[in-house]
Image (cartoon, grey):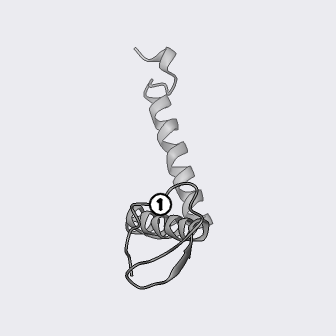
Amino acid sequence: CGWHNEGLTLRDREWECPVCHTRHDRDRNAALNLKSFGLKALARDAGEVKPLEMPNVDERAEMHLRSMASVNEENAHGYSMEASRLV
């Protein structure tokens, strides 16, 4: 029913709800509350899930070749990829 027993002490292992008369085991009830809290936190923090788009092997090879051509072109014009050679 959702009634919260403010009067529980550490000595109380079981208690009965005065509203719905359900008997509660304190440890089991605590575990259920933690599970509920955790599931709500996961759902809240998940955000929107989008699949990761991965290039296929041919696209990766093409990107690598373009990258190498760019580095070679920079070297031909006197540029260097190394920070120690930058002027």
Residue 68's spot in the image, x, y percent?
55, 43
Residue located beneath label 1 in the image = 8
> Is 25 situated left or right of 80 in this image?
right
Depth check: give the residue in front, 12 or 38: 12
Picture quadrant of residue 79: top left
Quadrant (top left/top right/bottom left/bottom right) for the C terminus: top left
Does residue 29 sit above or below 67 in this rendering? below
Does residue 57 sit above or below 84 in this rendering? below
Q: Residue at x 60, y 70 (%)?
A: 28
Residue 45's spot in the image, x, y percent?
40, 61
Near mark 1 (Cα within 10 A), the count class, few <14, some 14-19 or many ≥20, is few
Quadrant (top left/top right/bottom left/bottom right) for the N terminus: bottom left
Depth check: give the residue in front, 86 or 30: 30
Q: Residue at x 51, y 46 (%)?
A: 67
Q: Residue at x 47, y 60 (%)?
A: 8
Residue 4's spot in the image, x, y percent?
38, 68
The reply to whether residue 40 is visible in this rendering is: yes
Amino acid tagged 1: Leu
Does residue 51 sit above or below 72 in this rendering? below
Q: Secondary structure at mark 1?
A: loop
Count of numbered labels shown in the rendering: 1
Q: Residue at x 58, y 56 (%)?
A: 11
Depth check: give the residue in front, 78 or 82: 82
The reply to whether residue 52 is visible in this rendering is: no
